[in-house]
Amino acid sequence: MGDHIMSVVIERILRYRYIVCLLWLLLVVISLPSAVTLHDKLKLGGFTTDNLESVQVEKILQEDFKQSPTALAIVFYSPDLTADSPQFVSEVKRSLSKVSKLPYVTEILFHDISPQQVSPDRHTAIEVVGLSIPAEESYKVIDEIRDSIRPTSLEVQIGGAPIFYADIERASQRDLRRAELLAIPIGAIVLYWVFGSVVAAALPLIVGGVSVFIALGLLSQVADHTDISLLAVNAVTILGLGLAVDYSLFIVTRFREEYENSEDVEQSVAIAVTTAGKAAFFSGLTVGLGLTGLILFKFMFLRSVGIAATAVVTVSILASITLLPALIAILSRFVVRGTLSRSIAGSYIFWRSLAEKMMSKPLLVVLLVMPVLVSMGLPFLNARFSSPDPSILPTQYESRRVFDLVNESFGPGSSAPITVVVEANKPLTSPSSLDLLFRLSRAVQQEAGVTRVFSIVDIDPRLSLEQYKLIYTNAHNIKDPFADTFLRSFLSGNKTYMQIFTEYGWNDPKSKDIVTKLRNTQLPAGYKLFVGGPTAQVMDISSELWREFPPVFFFVIASTYIVLLYLLRSLLLPLKAIIMNLLSICASFGALVWIFQEGHLSWLFRFDPQGYVESMLPILMFCILFGLSMDYEVLLLSRIKEEWDKHKDNKQAVISGLARSARVVTSAALIVVVVGLSFISAEIILTKALGLGTALAVLIDATLVRMILVPALMRLLGDWNWWMPRLSAVSHRERSIDAEM
C-alpha cells in the first residue's frame, strides 16, 4: 500500500511539476527574511544545566553574595614598573575610569586591594570587571568596553568569558564560510565526475541549498520561542548539504539507469522515486531518529543541534522526493547527458567482482576486518573528558592569548579556583561553626598542590582558631577593618564560601581529585557543603551527560530497529546494521582520542593538543553518525532487498544489489566526507573534531563496513538474513494488494 500511495503522489508531482517548483521557490522566498535574521537570535553557551551542583554554587554567589554573573579580566603589564608602584596603580585606574561608568558594569576589583590578582614577578596585574550581563550574551558589549578603555603606557589585554564567547562567535562564522567555500566546489566536481553532466551534477546541489536555506528559516522561527546555539548552524550546513546531496544522488542515478532501459521520462522518474526515493525516505527517517535523540538532553547546546538537524533532515527528505522529481522531469533531456552507460557498466563489473571475492571467503574477511575496527576504537577507552576553554582557539584570538598569559604569569590554577559553599542552621561566626570552618580550611591546605585558601578563617595564616573566635565575638561590630571586609565578602546570612587556589588547571586530574575529596567530606548535622568552580563544573557536565545518555541511546537504537524491521522485513538485518554502525562509530571515536587528546597528527591538522576530548563531542557525534552511517546501510540494503524480492537467492541478491548500488553509495559517502573534511580548517577545535570525526566515520562505514564486512556477514547468515516468521503472511498479503492495485 505504501508503494501505491507513493506512486499516486509522484503522478501528481509529475503532472504539476512546474507548480511544485514554484511552491518550493515560494518557500525559499518566505524563508529569506527569517534566515537573514537568524544570526541575531542565536545564543552562545548552553553547556550547563541548572540542576548541576556547580551551577547552584554560581547562583548562590550571585544571589546571596551579590557577585556579578560575568567577570571580565583586563590584564595590565609593564616590564619596568611593578604592580604595587603608585604610577602603575594610577595608570590602571585612569585607564578604567570610563569603563566603571558603563551601565552594565557592576564593580571593578582592583589589584591594589586584592593581592592574588598580582603575578609573582609583580609586573602583571589583573583587574576584574563585573558585568550584570550573562556570560553567553556579554560578547555583545565587548566592543563598547574596549572603546572605553583609555590609552595608557601599560600593555593592556582583555580576557575572560565575554571575550571567549566573542571570539567563539567570530570564529564560528569564519569556520562556516570557509567550509562552504571548500565543500560546495569540491562537491560539485565529485558530482560532475559521477554524472558527466553539468545539469545532473547541479540538481543535488540545488536541492541541498534549498534544504539548508529553508531549514535556516524554520530554525529562525524556532529561535523566537527557545534558545538555539550559534554552533547549531554548522550542523545544519554539514547535514543539509550532505544528506540532500546523498538522496538526490541516489534518485538521479536510479532515474538515469531506468531511462537507459525505457527512454520514458515519467516512467523512469516514477520508478526512481518509488524505489530510490523510498529508500531515501527511510534513510532520512533513521537519520532523523538519531538526531531527535539530542532533543531529549537538558543541555541547550545539544538540544538546539538536535532541533536544527531534525529540521534540515525533514526538509531534505521532502525536497528529495518532491522538488527533485519535478526538476528531473523538467530538465530530463539535460539530466540524461553524460557517459552513463559506460560508467555504470564498468562500475557494475568492479563492484560485482569485489562482492564475489568478499563472499567467497566470508569468515576470513570477518576475522580480518573486525579486529581492525575494534583496534581502531581501543584508544577511546582512555578518553578523558572536559569542557572547552580558550585553548580550543588559535593563538591569534585575544581570549586565547590572555588565557596563556595568565597561566604563564600566575600559574594554571589561578583562573580555576575551587569554590566551597558551607550552609548552616546556626550563625557561622559561632565558636562551633568557626571550629568546623577552621578544620576544613586547614585540611584543604594540607592537600598537595593547594597554594592558598581565602575564607573568613584565612585572613592571616598566622592567626589561630582562638584568635578568629575572638575577632568574631561580636560579628556586627568588628574592630579590624580588614577582617570586617573579609567577613562582608565571604559571609551572607547562614552561608559562607571558601576559594581554594591550586597549582593545577581545571582539567587536571589532581584538581578533580581535590573536588572529589571535598564532596566526600562529611559535615556534622546542621551543615551542608557544596563545591563549585571550573573543575567541579567540568566534572558535573560529564557526569550529567553520561547520566542522560543511556535513555537516548536506547531510544535511538530501538526506534531505528523498528524502522528497519518495517523496511527490510527481517529480524536479523536491522540488528546486524546496528552492530556495524556501532563498530564504525567506535572506530571514529578512537581516532578522535588518538588525534585530539593524544595530539597525533596535530601538525597536519594545525591545532594544539588538548589532552582531553570535549565532553559533549562523543554524544553529539553518536547521534549524528549513527544516522549518517545507517543512511548508507539503508541505501545499500534496500537495493539488495529489491533483488531478494525478485529472485529469493541470498547470494545473488547481495552481489547484484551491492554491484548496482555501491557506486552511488560510495559517491554519496565521498560527498559527506568532503563536507566533513571542509571543517578541518576550522579555527574552533570542537568544530574541527566534529568535521573530521564525521568524515572518518563515513569513510570507515562506506568502505570497510558496507562494501567488505556487510557482504561477508550476509553470506555467512544466508537465508537467515530474511527470517521474519511472524510477519511473513502479512508481507505476502501486502504484496498481493499492491499487485491488485
Image: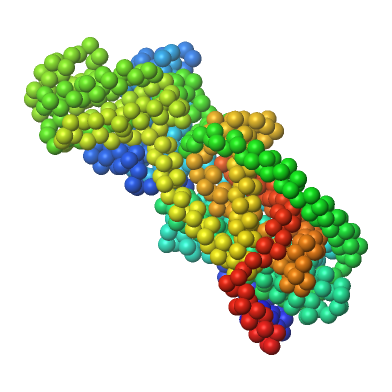
Does residue 704 show up?
no
Q: Is 273 on the left or on the right of 98, as rendered? A: right
Q: Is 84 on the left or on the right of 696, as rendered? A: left
Q: Is residue 567 above or below residue 504?
A: below
Q: Is residue 547 above or below residue 462?
A: below
Instruction: Please give the count of numbered marks on the rendered protein.
Output: 0
Image coordinates of residue 483 in percent, x first then y, are: 19, 21
Looking at the image, which residue is at 52% across and 60% down?
558
Query: Which of the pair 567/26 is nearer the observer?
Result: 567
Asked which quadrant contains residue 26, the reply is: bottom right
Looking at the image, which residue is at 18% across and 14% down?
464
Query: Which of the pair 75/306 is nearer the observer?
Result: 306
Image coordinates of residue 683 in percent, x first then y, are: 61, 39
Scheme of image coloration? rainbow
Image coordinates of residue 692 in percent, x first then y, are: 65, 43
Looking at the image, which residue is at 67% across and 71% down?
278
Query: Which of the pair 291/84 is nearer the observer?
Result: 291
Does residue 405 show up?
yes
Q: Is 158 on the left or on the right of 593, as rendered? A: left
Looking at the image, which residue is at 47% across and 12% down?
80
**Quadrant that contains the C terminus:** bottom right
Q: Is residue 361 above or below residue 540?
A: below
Q: Is residue 389 above or below residue 359?
A: above
Asked which quadrant contains residue 10, the reply is: bottom right
Specify the farthest residue to the bottom. 740
**Quadrant that contains the N terminus:** bottom right
